[in-house]
Amino acid sequence: MTDAHAVDDASNPEDAAARDGVGPVLHATELGRAVAAAIAAENDGVVVRDESAYLRVSAPRVCRVSRAGVESSTGYAVLFPGDLEVTMPSFAGKVAMNENGAVWWLASEPRPDLPAAGSVG
């Protein structure tokens, strides 16, 4: 009998995120939760693990977040990359940020494009 938790199911977002997951670790604050919500809205296969004091956000291979998406979640203006850097003590993968958003990706992959000005998702 096989333990269902030990089976790697490519169709299961948690398995894909664990295997090829990239993304931020966020403080469990209002802003951290808004960033996690924006990431979940803008990416497929996102897994958010609430670890009480922090949120581990993981998406398979590439994870993007736009400043516009975070502002939509918070209801107020957010400064990128500064506000993101303050709430993100760590991350998995490589990261690039600018005033419009951030992208995390696998180190073995080419760098993806950052979100464009005003874009969501």
Image (cartoon, rainbow, N blue to C red):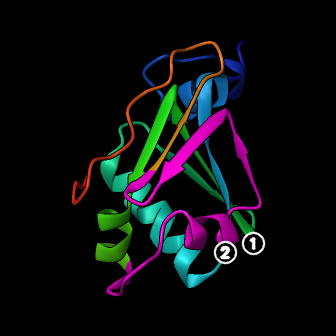
Other residues around mark 2 within 10 Å, as few (<14) / some (14–19) / many (≥20): some
Image location of residue 65, percent across then percent down = 41, 52
Quadrant showing the N terminus = top right
Badge 1 marks a residue whose secondary structure is loop
Residue drawn where x is 50% and y is 61% of the image: 36
Please state the horizontal and vertical placement of residue 49, each as a whole percent of the image: 64, 55
Instruction: Nearest to the eye among marks 1 and 2: give it.
Output: 2
Instruction: In the rendered view, tell whether residue 44 sits above or below residue 53.
Output: above
Taking the image as drawn, is residue 73 in sight?
A: yes
Q: Which mark is residue 28?
A: 2
Q: Position of residue 48 (x, y in %)?
A: 56, 53
Question: What span is in magenta?
Answer: 74-101
Q: Is residue 32 above or below residue 14?
A: below
**Upstream in the sequence, badge 1 or badge 2?**
2
- Closer to us: 7 or 90: 90
Which of the two residues, 17 or 63, is positioned nearer the viewer here? 63
Q: Is the C-beta separation of discs 1 and 2 under 8 Å?
A: yes
Q: Secondary structure at mark 2?
A: loop
Residue of label 1: 52
